[in-house]
Amino acid sequence: SRVQTVRDTVLFQPPHPEFLKQEVIDTVDHEAHLTQKPTVALFKSMFVPGWGQIGNHKYLKAAVIIGLQSWFIASAVHYGRQASDYRRQWLAETDLARRRELYSQFDERRDKRNKFIWFAGLTTFVSMFDAYVDAHLSGKPREPKVKTLSVRLGPDPGGGGRVELALRF
């Protein structure tokens, strides 16, 4: 009996030998036009919030990221200090009812601190990969933006007149 083998890989065979010798149509090296290397942008954003976006000339994104990171870190520090204060009071308190109240305050502040730490980490992660992708896209030739404003005048179904303005951007 013969054993039949089945191959799951199909080899590419060009239709004719000249197929592989065709010229490249677009000879522009888009990587030569990058504003910065993508990996550099990623690490810049990891170490300093918004730095990768600044390197990509995306200043509005950089401002948003710097603002968010500052707010998240400041909030985490604020709630961390409050959690430490409530913990210290909770450990020093002897009255059981007051201890429960202080522990509840400590636990709430600790949860808020942890939430803002996670938000800061998530913002850093998103910022890193946004800078990485923007750096890759920075070498792409830009098409001129065409802004058009159109005005249409016409009758309104209710018996009056209507003016429509449309701005394409």
Image: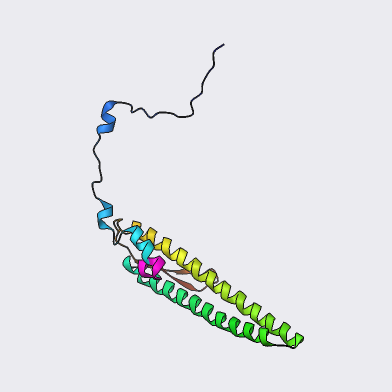
The residue shown at (41%, 66%) is 46
Give the position of the N terminus as an image quadrant: top right
Residue 51 magenta-highlighted: yes
Percent across and percent down for residue 42 are: 38, 62
From the viewer's side, name the closer residue of 1 and 82: 82
Give the position of the C terminus as an image quadrant: bottom left
Residue 168 makes an appearance in the image: no
* Quarter occupied by residue 150: bottom left
* Quarter occupied by residue 153: bottom left
From the viewer's side, name the closer residue of 27 and 71: 71
Percent across and percent down for residue 17 are: 27, 26
The residue shown at (25%, 55%) is 32
Residue 19 makes an appearance in the image: yes
Residue 150 magenta-highlighted: no
Left-right relation of 116 to 50: right
Up-down relation of residue 85 to residue 23 (above or below):
below
Percent across and percent down for residue 120 are: 49, 71
Q: Which residues are magenta?
A: 45-53
